[in-house]
Image (cartoon, rainbow, N blue to C red):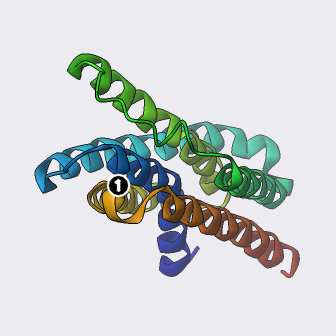
Amino acid sequence: MSFWAILLLALAMSTDAFAVAVCRGVTLKSTRFLGALKVGILFGVVEAITPLLGWLIGYIALQYIQQWDHWVVFAVMLFLGINMIYSSFKNSDEDCQDDKGASSKKSSLILIFTAISTSIDAFAVGIGLALASVNIFFAATMIGIATCLMVTIGLLLGNKLGCLIGKRAEFLGGLVLILIGVITLYQHLSN
């Protein structure tokens, strides 16, 4: 997988976190850069760890499925892409609800849970990356950095952009994942 493909993958993986951050930014009266950066770092670290865990499982499974690994990568990317596209069309009213009454501790727990839930797809991608023989440390770092940047920007722009742009980014991310799956399948079948 080329640098550009990994960069596109990293951006695609960060779009769901970006959508959540934009919606979260809508509910905040004001967002300071340092606060947005802290949330971005949290999401970025979680999003970088989960493909590493997925890669480990994929690497262990590789010896058993090596003959049809490209089909597994294609299926995983297709499933995640379709899921992201579907999610981009769902009504996001609950994402954009104001939670000003939440305590700081409860808000922090919700933030951590949200970071984990938006990174589950990165776990599945990590499995696919093991099957595609990608340098997982580079890919995970790129995914973490992209997510950190996208979440920080999403929080800062949330008041101005609204949830609609976050959902469009998630739709685009789903298309990119499907494209990566198709390219991986094509490369293996054409050899």
Please name the residue shown 43% across and 56% down the image: 18
Q: What residue type is labelled 1?
A: Val
Residue 183 x/y as whole percent = 74, 76
Q: Which of 130 and 4 is in front in this view?
A: 4
Q: In which quarter of the image is residue 158?
A: bottom left
Residue 31 x/y as whole percent = 19, 51
Quadrant into which the N terminus falls: bottom right
Please name the residue shown 23% across and 46% down the image: 29
Q: Is residue 101 above or below residue 65?
A: above
Q: Is residue 102 above or below residue 16?
A: above
Please name the residue shown 70% across and 54% down the image: 89
Residue 145 visible in the picture: no
Q: Name the residue under label 1.
A: 151
Q: Which of 179 and 104 is in front in this view?
A: 104
Q: What element carries label 1?
A: helix
Q: In this view, does 187 lie above or below 48?
A: below
Residue 184 x/y as whole percent = 74, 70
Q: In which quarter of the image is residue 174?
A: bottom right
Q: In this view, does 115 lie above or below 10?
A: above
Residue 1 visible in the picture: yes
Judged left or right of residue 141, residue 8 is: right
Q: Which of 154 and 42 is in front in this view?
A: 154
Judged left or right of residue 15, residue 188 is: right
